[in-house]
Image: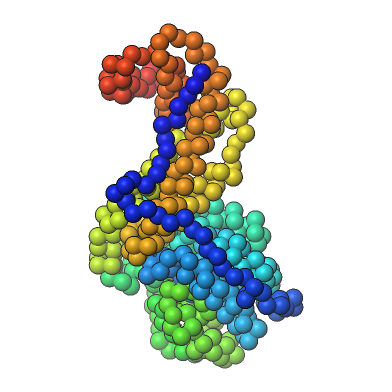
Amino acid sequence: MKINCLINYRLGKTIPKALVFNFMLATAAFSQPVNSAKTAVNPIDPAFIDISKPTLFTVPYTHLDDVWRWSYPQVIRDFLKNTLDDNFKAFNEYPNYVFNWTGANRYQMMREYYPEKYAELKEWVAAGRWFPSGNSWSENDVNVPSTESIIRQILMGHQFFKNEFGKESQEFMLPDCFGFPYSLPSVLHHCGIRGFSTQKLTWESANGIPFNIGRWIGPDGKSVIAALNGGDYAAAHNHVYSTHNETLERLEKNRAVSGLPIDFFYIGGGDKNNADRGGVIQKVSLEAMKKTQETKGPITVISGQADLMFRAITDEQTKKFPTWNKDLLLVKHSTGVLTSQAYTKKLNRKAELLANASERAVVAAHQFYGLAYPYGVLNEAWGLVLRNQYHDMLPGTSIPKAHEEGWNDGIIALNKFAGVYQDAIGALARSLNTDVPGDRYLFLIHFPFHGKILLKPLSLKNWQMQHLFPSLMQWEKKFLRKL
């Protein structure tokens, strides 16, 4: 029996042809000798942090837009390299400096294009100086993608960090995104995430900033601890926070509304204020952090990995926190992004639907007929889809070249999913008796709400095809009523 797969995605004639990446980067220039002696920091046990006293948690972090006013070639050539080199230098100059960085997709690119630097990075991670934070594959948009996609972001990001570095985090860091849906805290909670942080609500939030530290509750009643006012990640910090009166006043105000005098600040900006390009945090901030650690005062300042505050807070303490039970949307900064770059959004949705169909089919083929499960192909395809969901790619706020390259990734992902689907259908079909008269068609019908799949061979005449899909929809409804 011959089965034709009708799924073959390619760019249409009216769409500019995307370029296949061929980054020819010279790695010889970056192969400096690796210093094997890494100055480690002592790990901080959150259980021993007394957050009944004024405590400021600072999170050194520099923001990199994977795509925006640039595309991946420049990010790989300049921004990833600078982030590695400049932070390695700062680690040696500031022995208590701990750096946080998100996005497993970035780490994957560093591993591919800078293998020697990546080996050194692993040593710094093991020494506690660099923390893979955020738990996600990319700093993704959370408004357009499906819930399944957001879960995949966390699943694949978490697995990458655990497998590559042996590190796990309990927070989801999304400093820059164009609003956050009501469903997000529920999704994060069910993924095992304890804390969420952002600073984007300072960019004209529709509801202001509900609280600095509180509890964000989703539609099913599940919640996460939320730090909603992490401060401008592009700003320089020159205060000695252990003795800073304005910070102490802010902590006491937090105590009045939440019962705890604590807060959460991003410390970043990129050296020389190259915000959005990664790198190391600004020199003035490094100096201020050093002086803060050397100066005793009424405020305990803890600078380290991004999930420390969320782990230090007990479930009992969260019961006194202020709560928010709605969306967290923006007024101006996100205007138009839900409808711009329609082709990018179309590819994303096609990929989400085809991924669902292909995985359902291959699970059935694997479970009942022993088809080898294509973990590698599915993860590669999902990795391309997830990086296209970056918060400046899927919303449509990047330069045209970045979207052109994103179309290429999206089409590669579609073809990978289509190959999995075709193989699965073939395996299922070979197990069936398709000895029916006339032309033979094989229909795989999914019933997602009941977890059932019906695979049925039919004999149809050509004139019947135009009536096929309405008839199948009615038949499916009747079938569901009988379950």
- In the displayed structure, would residue 225 be above or below residue 128? above
Residue beneath the point at 48% across and 66% down: 73
Q: What is the count of numbered marks?
A: 0
Residue 396 visible in the current orientation = yes
Residue 143 visible in the current orientation = no
Would residue 230 be found to the left or right of residue 346 on screen? right
- In the displayed structure, would residue 68 be above or below residue 410? below
Q: Looking at the picture, how far across and down is residue 224, in whole percent?
A: 45, 58
Residue beneath the point at 54% across and 56% down: 157
Residue beneath the point at 29% across and 49% down: 14
Q: Looking at the picture, how far across and down is residue 48, in whole percent?
A: 62, 71
Q: Residue furthest right?
A: 37
Scheme of colours in the image: rainbow
Would residue 89 be found to the left or right of residue 249 on screen? right
Residue beneath the point at 40% across and 44% down: 10
Seen from the viewer's position, the closer of residues 261 and 273 is 273
Would residue 325 be found to the left or right of residue 225 on screen? left
Seen from the viewer's position, the closer of residues 374 and 286 is 374
Q: Looking at the picture, how far across and down is residue 482, in whole percent?
A: 38, 18
Q: Looking at the picture, how far across and down is residue 399, in whole percent?
A: 34, 65
Seen from the viewer's position, the closer of residues 410 and 331 is 410
Q: Quadrant for the C terminus, please.
A: top left
The image quadrant that residue 85 belongs to is: bottom right
